Image: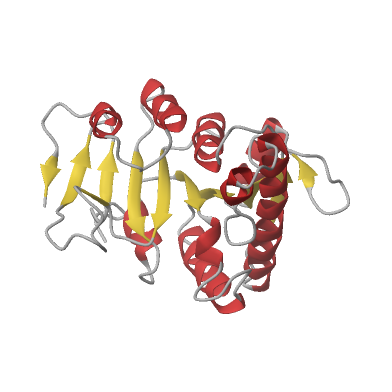
Amino acid sequence: MNGDRPKYQRILLKISGEAFSGTESGVDVTTTREMAQQIADVHADGVSIAVVVGGGNIWRGKVHEEAGMDRATADYMGMLATVINALALQDALERLGVPSRVQTAIAMHQIAEPYIRRRAMRHLEKGRVVIFAAGTGNPYFTTDTTAALRAVEMNAQAILKATKVDGIYTADPLKDKTATRFERMDYMDVLQRGLEVMDSTAMALCMDNQLPIIVFDMGVPGNIRRVVWGDGIGTYVGKSETAPAVR
């Protein structure tokens, strides 16, 4: 690890719904426990952690939209799927002794708190992990946009986007063996290249607020902690004075 203290004191971790499924559909207990352990390790370093979860392991709205379902209805169903994942992650964290709270953008008082910014900030100040579910509460917005919005609201120093690959590549590394990884990119370069890092709304919000994004592979145990401590893994997206570096 670089230095004697974490590089980032407060982070927003974006976890896709697919990350919860492991090799199966739905919520895989072992995979969820492993994710929770990585979060717990970072929490033990005194880092303030907020999490935004997706719901693609349970509901893929795009498939149903293509079959004729109303877009807003499909999006609301996807928001409900994120709540299931958030509760699963909260349970895994609590069993590791990490205090956590789930806040949802759609009110469901029996199982989670409503999203209230000041309350979420207070939880973070008290050392609790805050898990944001149900997106922004509005259709037509992705969980990427939710991650950017909540990160800005929570005064996070960076968004850590967990993926299945170790950064941003010039092409899909699973399909193109000649693809090379970017170590660092500027926001505008990501947008101009049309790279599917985050949707354009989320990327623009991060750019406007100069909020860096680190894209990394969470499948490697300990990678969240490595990013937080500034070990330079993955791809850093932020304000850049130089051309993108390719590795």
- Residue extending farthest to the right is 110
165 relative position to 116: left or right: left
26 relative position to 193: left or right: right
- Residue extending farthest to the front is 67
Q: Residue 94's quadrant in the figure?
A: bottom right
Percent position (x, y) of residue 232?
Answer: 23, 53
Name the image colouring. secondary structure
Residue at 38% from the left image edge and 45% from the top image edge:
8
Between 6 and 70, the one lying in front of the other is 70
Can residue 70 be seen by looking at this rendering? Answer: yes
Task: Answer above or below: position of 173 versus 8.
Answer: below
Percent position (x, y) of residue 157?
Answer: 42, 37
Between 144 and 95, the one lying in front of the other is 144
190 relative position to 27: left or right: left
- Residue extending farthest to the top is 208
Residue at 23% from the left image edge and 30% from the top image edge:
189
Can residue 126 be seen by looking at this rendering? Answer: no
Residue at 66% from the left image edge and 36% from the top image edge:
71
Task: Answer above or below: position of 99 versus 219.
Answer: above
Percent position (x, y) of residue 188?
Answer: 27, 26
18 relative position to 204: left or right: right
Percent position (x, y) of residue 134?
Answer: 68, 44
Number of numbered discs present? 0
Residue at 14% from the left image edge and 54% from the top image edge:
180
Between 136 and 127, the one lying in front of the other is 136
Quadrant where the N terminus is found in the figure: bottom left
